[in-house]
Image (cartoon, helix red, strand yellow):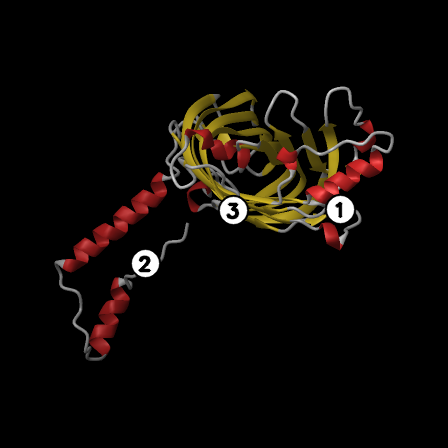
Amino acid sequence: MFFVSLLAPAQERDSISESQPSTVTPPSSSLRPQLANIKKQIKKTVRGFDRLDTTFIEPQHYVFTVMLQATHNYDIYMLRGIGNNAQSITFAPDMNMKLGPYVGWKWFFFGYTFELGNVNLQRIKQQLDLSIYSSQVGVDLFYRRTGNDYKLRNANLGEGIDTSPLEGKSFNGIKAGITGFNAYYIFNHGRFSYPAAFSQSTIQKVSCGSWMAGLGYTRNSLELDYERLQSLIDLNMMSKYVKLDSALMFRKVNYNDYSISGGYAYNWVFKKNWLFGASLQAALAYKKSTGDVAGNNRDGFDFKNVNLDGIGRFGLVYNNMRWYAGASVIVHTNNYHKSRFRTNNTFGSLNMYVGYNFGLKKRYRKNHED
């Protein structure tokens, strides 16, 4: 959080007025207390985002941090027709591992990661994940565009049909994208620390939990080259011809997702400086299609477009305030239903990290050496 004061120091203002005549009328004496009060209220509001009960939470003692993090990303798409005998196909890329350094200042982390192993320029993904945590409020921002590295993981093409020849086959005819945010409020923020589990900026001293509520928006896109998918099926199911279900014969689907979420989070302090944190949120989401809308109610609200999504976060942390290390898992699942087919997209990341805090804050320097 950045704050810029618009008021010059008193001594500087006095020296300017004494050294040269001013053509600008200075603020009246009655206006100055009002401006000072506004400045005070802004500072109070900003500091209020991190107001803590120190019996339960130890505040961060340092201003800066450096961290090395390894990240495994995963992304699964399931397509399924409607009906008891509907076909279904699941796609997922191989899990990749990225490694990179991060630098932190107060609430913010900045960093860069690179993929380990051989990099195929045709398979590079565009991805940005940014999380901002205070004691009261959390915000997750995400931007993802897949590369052409999906593989067919599982298929059900009809009763009695052996689809094992298809499993693990590469398929570059599907592209997916998701852009959006989730913002949530933590009710018991004075005693429960979300940052202790997921941004290592505080230490939870006593086990505690909290209810959460939030809002979210995402824009999703899904493209499928079903003709290429049919060719893949024909090539690998040589002994038996299998026709792809018409419900899965679509080119592109775009939809906007508006959600209201609620859930519970808990930090378990099972040993000094050790913490296991978990949170689960269910989101009631309204999904509005653009470009592939069918039916008479395309411009109005339709309960058929309301789906249940979910967000899960799990973290294991060791933190003695100077050094910290741990691992976290974040999982998002989005569902989309239409009259002819439905999709499920599950994506997230596994993070493993080790870090070091430095730059002791003034109020802690009496009892520590930096």
As measured in the structure, the alpha-carbon distance from the residue carrying label 2 to the one carrying label 3 is 47 Å
Where residue 351 appears, as percent x and y from the top left, is: 64, 37
Quarter occupied by residue 317 = top right
Residue at the spot of label 1: 116
- Is 311 left, or right, of 248 in this rendering? left
The amino acid on which the numbered mark 1 sits, given as a three-letter code, is Leu
Q: Quadrant of the C terminus?
A: top right
Question: CB under 8 Å between callouts 2 and 3?
Answer: no
- Is 37 left, or right, of 264 in this rendering? left
Provide the secondary structure element on which disc 1 rests.
Answer: loop
Q: Which mark's residue is nearer the viewer, 1 or 3?
A: 3
As measured in the structure, the alpha-carbon distance from the residue carrying label 1 to the one carrying label 3 is 38 Å
Query: Which residue is at the front of the view, 320 or 269?
Result: 269
> Would you place residue 278 above or below residue 224 in this image?
above
Instruction: Name the residue: 22% across, 80% down.
Output: 20
Residue at the spot of label 2: 5
Where residue 152 appears, as percent x and y from the top left, is: 74, 35
Q: Residue furthest right?
A: 239
Provide the secondary structure element on which disc 2 rests.
Answer: loop
The amino acid on which the numbered mark 2 sits, given as a three-letter code, is Ser
Q: Earlier in the sequence, mark 1 or mark 3?
A: 1
The amino acid on which the numbered mark 3 sits, given as a three-letter code, is Gly
Where residue 318 appears, as percent x and y from the top left, is: 60, 30
Q: Total of numbered circles in the picture?
A: 3
Q: Which mark's residue is nearer the viewer, 2 or 3?
A: 3
